[in-house]
Amino acid sequence: MVLIQSFQQPTGLPEWLAIAGVFVFGALVGSFVNVVIHRVPLGKSIVFPNSHCPRCGVAIKPYDNIPIASWVILGGRCRACREGISFRYPLVELLNAFLWLGVYLYAGFTPILPVFLIFTSVMLALMHIDAEHMILPNAITYPFFIFAIFSRIVIPAISGRLMFPDDNVWPAFELIEYGSVAVSIVLASLGAIAGGGSLWFVGEIWKRLRGVEAMGLGDVKMMFGVGALLGWRLTLLSIFIAAFSGAVIGIAVIAAQKEKNLQRQIPFGVFLGAGAIVSLLFGQRLLEWYLSAF
C-alpha cells in the first residue's frame, strides 16, 4: 500500500490558510452536529424547523448562530428570554473543529479526507447522545454503516488504489489480484465482523453466564460501521482502548459512590467513539510501537 499522504493534491493555498479553513468549516459543521445531538434522540427532524430557543421558541438569528463566538458574545444565554444555553454547544463546535484539523493533518487533501471527516463527526454525535440519553439511535447507526460500505466501494473505484487504514495488512496482499474494490469489500466485511460481531459475541456470552445484558445492540450496530471503515486491526484496537478506559472510569465512578452499585450502567458508546477516533489518528503508530517491543 502507498501511504495516504502520497495522494495529497496541491491546493495552491498557503498551509496556514488551509488549516484555518478546515478549522472554521469544522466548527460550522459542529453546529450541525449539535442539532443532531439535540433532535435525533427526540425523534425530531434535523432540517425543519430552523434553530430556535427551546424555552421561548424565538428563531435564532444568523448573527447569533456563529459557532463558538455567538455563545461567548451572548454570555451563554438566549438573546430574547435570557435562558441559559448549555456549554455543550460551543464545546461540540470546538471539538469538531479540532477533530477535523487532526484528520486533515493525518490524511491531507485526498479522496479519503471527506470520509474520515464525516466519520469523526458521527462519532462525536454518537458519543454525546449516548452520554446524555444512554442510547445509540438507529437513525444514525444504520445510515453510518451504509455510508461505510458505500465509501469502501466508491473510494477504490474512483482512485483505483487502496487508501483505507487496513489496506496494507492481511489479507489485502493475498487478494490484490481480484482488484482494489473487491479487496476493499472483503476488508470492510472483516472489519465489521471484528467490530460488531465481536461485541455481540461477548455480550451474548455474558448474558448467558450472568443473566444480564452486558451492552446494548446500539454498541454493536455502531461498531459494525466503525469496523467497516477502519478494518479489523484498528477496530480491535478501538475496542481495547474503549474497554480499558471504560473500566478505569467505571471503577472510579463506583469508588466515588456512597452505596456501591456494581450493576451501574456506563455509556460504553462514549468510550467506543473515543477509541475509534484515537485509532484512526494514532492507531497505526500505536500498533507499530507495540509490535516493535516484540
Image: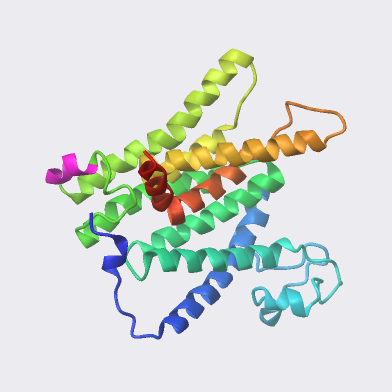
Judging depth in this view, the residue of 84 and 117 nearest the camera is: 117
Residue sitting at 17 percent across and 41 percent down?
175
Q: Is residue 8 left or right of residue 38?
A: left
* Front residue of 264 and 140: 264
Residue name at image x 67 percent, y 56 percent:
38
**Image quadrant where one finds the N terminus:** bottom left
Residue 12, percent from left and from top: 33, 85
- Count of numbered circles on the image: 0
The stretch of residues the image draws in magenta is: 172-178
Q: Is residue 207 magenta?
A: no
Q: Quadrant of residue 35?
A: bottom right
The chief SS type of the magenta part is helix
Query: What residue appears at the point 56 percent right and 49 percent down from the top-left corner?
Result: 274
Q: Position of residue 146 (x, y in %)?
A: 40, 47
The residue lying at 81 percent from left, 38 percent from top is 256
Residue 43 appears in the figure = no
